[in-house]
Image (cartoon, helix red, strand yellow):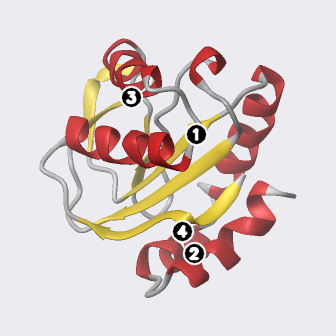
């Protein structure tokens, strides 16, 4: 599920759409999703925002339904500059995520399990700061592997 090839450091994007499109296209290139995944994630984000305030900084967890997924995967991006996302459950609130966790989940029950693990991680200020401040993909991989594969 977690691959060093799907980790981005210092990702420079203009806005939410640019960020989502970049990560979703990484999934397409890696062969873990169908081409339809890109537009499906963008559309879902408009209807059901995925940004959350965490103890250290805001994050976003863009994803979509399993019909667009071939193989489970997670893409992680530390943004060079935060961009605007709407808050999950409160779309009238604008957040500025510094880290994105894009999910490609083929089994809905696996999605719930992974989301629970990510939610727990969002309460760990030290871990979040270490992810944001990581200098290499290996560092992020080593920090997230226990969370994802708990």
Secondary structure under the numbered disc 3 in the rendered image:
helix
Secondary structure under the numbered disc 2 in the rendered image:
helix
- Of labels 3 and 4, earlier in sequence is 3
Foreground pick, 60 / 34: 34
- Of labels 1 and 4, earlier in sequence is 1
- Of labels 2 and 4, earlier in sequence is 4
Up/down of 45 relative to 26, above or below: above
Please tell me whether mark 3 or mark 1 is closer to you in this view: 3
Do the residues under discs 3 and 1 have CB atoms within 8 angstroms? no
- Of labels 3 and 2, earlier in sequence is 3
From the top left corner, tell me how far across and down residue 19 is, in percent: 28, 46
Marks 3 and 4, Cα distance to the nearest angstrom?
A: 26 Å
From the top left corner, tell me how far across and down residue 56 is, in percent: 45, 64
Q: Residues within 10 Å of mark 3 (few under 14, many from 20)?
A: many
Marks 3 and 2, Cα distance to the nearest angstrom?
A: 24 Å
x 12%, y 49%: residue: 14
**The quarter of the displayed image where residue 99 is located:** bottom left
x 52%, y 30%: residue: 63
Q: Which residue is mark 1?
A: 103
- Of labels 3 and 1, earlier in sequence is 3
Q: Which residue is mark 2?
A: 140
Q: Which residue is mark 3?
A: 38
x 59%, y 54%: residue: 122
Q: Which residue is mark 4?
A: 128
Q: Give the left or right position of residue 92, taking residue 53 as reference.
A: left
């Amino acid at each position: 599920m977690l691959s060093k090839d799907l980790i981005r450091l210092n990702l420079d994007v203009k806005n939410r759409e640019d960020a989502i499109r970049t990560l979703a296209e990484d999934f397409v290139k890696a062969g873990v999703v169908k081409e339809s995944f890109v537009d499906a994630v963008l559309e879902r984000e408009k209807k059901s925002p995925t940004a959350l305030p965490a103890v250290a900084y805001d994050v976003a967890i863009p994803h979509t339904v399993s019909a667009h997924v071939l193989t489970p995967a997670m893409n992680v991006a530390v943004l060079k500059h935060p961009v605007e996302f709407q808050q999950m459950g409160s779309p009238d609130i604008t957040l500025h995520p510094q880290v994105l966790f894009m999910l490609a989940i083929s089994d809905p029950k696996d999605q719930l399990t992974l989301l629970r693990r990510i939610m727990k991680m969002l309460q760990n200020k030290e871990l979040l700061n270490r992810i944001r401040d990581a200098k290499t993909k290996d560092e992020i991989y080593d920090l997230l592997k226990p969370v994802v594969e708990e």
